[in-house]
Image (cartoon, grey):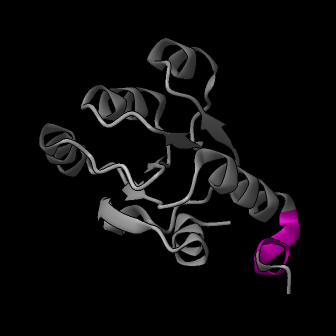
Amino acid sequence: MDLASIVKILNLKVYSGMDKLNRSILGGYTGDLLSDVMANSQEGDIWVTRQVHQNIIAVASLKDHAGIILVHGAEPAKDTLDKAIKENIPLMVSEQSGFEVVGQIYTLIKGGGNNAVTGH
């Protein structure tokens, strides 16, 4: 599953890293505690968080995450967006809760495709 498909299916608003949306997503991580994300996430993960400060970009860059999804319609802080653009990290926003986003992405990655997410 590539990031562009996730963006389309989950109707995510993309703020940065548009040219990296073809990257494959093999896993994901959800969490707001940066030290936990640094210790336990993997390269290529899609990270789902409610954090909006610029340190999320540093962690995503360090761990080579495929991108970051902010949930509950959280808007990135200006310095966060500036850093995401500079680092070319895909930064996206969902209006849904973290629970909903993670469940849908898990279903997509594990082979359920769009039908499993939409129920069709």
Compared with 26, 13 (above or below) is below
Q: Quadrant of residue 51?
A: top left
64 to the left or right of 82 = right
Give the quarter of the image for residue 9: bottom right
Residue located at (85% from left, 87% from top) = 120
Q: Residue at x 70, y 45 (%)?
A: 27
Residue 77's quadrant in the figure?
top left
User: Which quarter of the rendering shows the N terminus?
Assistant: bottom right
Give x and y (percent) for residue 71. Answer: 48, 49
- Horizontal and vertical percent position of residue 62: 40, 26
Front one among 81 and 22: 81
The residue that appears at 86% across and 69% down in the rendered structure is: 112
- In this image, 25 relative to 15: left or right? right
Q: Compared to 76, does 113 lie above or below? A: below
Q: Position of residue 110 (x, y in %)?
A: 84, 58
Q: Using residue 94 as the reference point, say whether residue 101 is left or right of it.
A: right
Q: Number of marks in the image? A: 0
Residue 33 lies, in percent from the top left, at 50, 18
Q: Which residues are magenta?
A: 111-117
